[in-house]
Image (cartoon, rainbow, N blue to C red):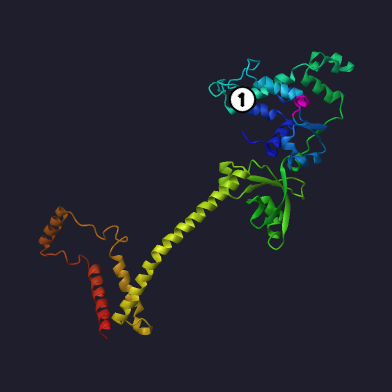
């Protein structure tokens, strides 16, 4: 599903050089590793230009594998592959008869395959592996069978049988992929700077416990530290860095968990960051526009307050300010509306309850009007408030 790139080619090469048992298990196919024993490095690799001609692909020969680039417009240079691709994709009914096929050069009113398409990606991958296994079982040219292979029976005459026989009787032409081969030759390498926050790769920050154990993050506080890192361009949630102490490539994770949740590539992550910055800049412009509208209102409130102070002639400095008394009065005033005026401080009694209260008071011979406090605490509070107001009025008169 990805666009052609070195990252996609590297994944294909990794599948070539790795054990196929993982593929069979993931796809639920009735095969084992011994049924497809191809997991060795080749002497040379024939490439169809494109990805291996790119800047990243040109570094692959440093692995020791000789790369041959086929000339342009020469399908005969890779006839087996081109023939099998045509056998799968050609429109006439063939061995596999896959739904959704269409001609490479469509004629007028010829079907485009959309109406007959029926396979999802998982189903198509299973079928593709079955096709490869079928190709492996096909016979080779009879003249290629060596004399010492004739006694092995018909199995040695198949492609996969001849390959398996050659691994045992013609050793020395293949190598096995080492533990660090993928990090050093298939993934994209970079010399990444390190800060106390972590490893910086393509605008993202990655960290892990191993970096702290090695002391690399502490060292980067006062020094310019760089570390060899490798990453998959299609997966921006993790990278690998070279642990020189153990000779391994531990994994470091993106400090932003949203990238792992999205399973985004580095290119998609860059677009995501650009959109974040765009929205932030727009929010800043919106805030600035609203601020220009509201600042004059705030300034007007300040000017009115200053003018009122001059007309009232209240002293606000030194011992004349009576800060404590005034603050107590202000707190009392603010407490009365309840939760910012959202609810009333004392819900009214229903009419029936009020009659019951008056009836009970009548038995005791006490009549309590609505404007009289019901408790001694409330009476004391009102007397204190009245006293504070008298002091304020006395200050205003002076």
The answer to whether residue 52 is above or below residue 165 is: below
What residue would you read off at disc 1? 124
Q: Nearer the viewer, residue 273 or 214?
A: 273
Residue drawn where x is 28% and y is 63% of the image: 337
Residue drawn where x is 42% and y is 64% of the image: 292
- Residue 66 in the figure: left or right of residue 235: right
Q: Return the residue found at the far bottom.
A: 398
Asked if one can make out residue 108 in the rendered structure from this viewpoint, the answer is yes
Residue segment shown in magenta: 73-78
Q: Quadrant of the N terminus?
A: top right
Is 9 included in the stretch rendered in magenta?
A: no
- Residue 317 in the figure: left or right of residue 333: right
Asked if one can make out residue 28 in the rendered structure from this viewpoint, the answer is no
- x and y percentages locating residue 369 in the rendered image: 14, 65
Q: Nearer the viewer, residue 194 or 380?
A: 194
- x and y percentages locating residue 232 in the rendered image: 67, 42
Q: Return the residue found at the far right.
A: 147
- x and y percentages locating residue 41 in the rendered image: 79, 32
Is 75 included in the stretch rendered in magenta?
A: yes
The answer to whether residue 359 is above or below residue 7 is: below
Mark 1 element type: helix
In terms of secondary structure, what is the magenta stretch mainly?
helix
Q: Quadrant of the C terminus?
A: bottom left
- x and y percentages locating residue 267 in the rendered image: 62, 44
Q: Nearer the viewer, residue 252 or 160?
A: 160
Residue drawn where x is 69% and y is 52% of the image: 211
- Residue 70 in the figure: left or right of residue 300: right
Q: Quadrant of residue 195?
A: bottom right
Q: Nearer the viewer, residue 131 or 38?
A: 131
């Amino acid at each position: 599903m990805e666009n052609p790139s070195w990252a996609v080619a590297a994944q294909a090469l990794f599948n070539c050089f790795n054990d196929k048992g993982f593929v069979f298990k993931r796809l639920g196919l009735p095969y084992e590793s011994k049924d497809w024993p191809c997991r060795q490095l080749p002497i040379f690799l024939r490439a169809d230009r494109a990805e291996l001609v790119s800047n990243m692909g040109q570094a692959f020969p440093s692995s020791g594998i000789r790369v041959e680039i086929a000339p342009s417009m020469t399908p005969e240079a890779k006839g087996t592959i081109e023939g099998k691709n045509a056998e799968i994709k050609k429109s006439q009914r063939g061995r596999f008869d896959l739904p959704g096929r269409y001609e490479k050069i469509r004629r007028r009113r010829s079907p485009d395959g959309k109406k007959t398409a029926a396979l999802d990606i998982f189903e198509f991958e299973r079928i593709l592996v079955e096709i490869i296994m079928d190709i492996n079982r096909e016979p080779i040219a009879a003249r290629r069978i060596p004399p010492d292979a004739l006694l092995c029976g018909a199995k040695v005459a198949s492609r996969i049988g001849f390959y398996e026989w050659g691994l045992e009787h013609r050793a020395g032409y293949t190598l096995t992929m080492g533990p660090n081969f993928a990090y050093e030759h298939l993934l994209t390498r970079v010399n990444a700077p390190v800060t106390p926050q972590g490893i910086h790769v393509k605008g993202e920050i990655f960290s892990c416990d191993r970096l702290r154990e090695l002391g690399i993050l502490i060292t980067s506080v006062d020094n310019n530290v760089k570390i060899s890192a490798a990453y998959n361009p299609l997966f921006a949630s993790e990278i690998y860095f070279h642990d020189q102490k153990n000779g391994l490539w531990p994994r470091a994770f993106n400090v932003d968990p949203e990238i792992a949740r999205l399973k985004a590539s580095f290119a998609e992550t860059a677009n995501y960051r650009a959109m974040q910055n765009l929205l932030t800049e727009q929010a800043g412009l919106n805030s600035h526009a609203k601020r220009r509208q509201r600042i004059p209102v705030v300034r007007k409130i300040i000017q009115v307050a200053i003018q009122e102070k001059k007309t009232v002639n209240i002293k606000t400095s030194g011992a004349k300010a009576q800060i404590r008394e005034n603050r107590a009065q202000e707190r009392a005033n603010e407490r009365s509306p309840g939760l910012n005026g959202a609810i009333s401080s004392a819900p009214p009694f229903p009419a029936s309850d009020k009659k019951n209260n008056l009836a009970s008071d009548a038995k005791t011979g006490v009549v309590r009007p609505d404007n009289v406090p019901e408790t001694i605490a409330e009476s004391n509070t009102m007397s204190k408030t009245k006293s504070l107001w008298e002091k304020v009025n006395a200050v205003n008169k002076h």
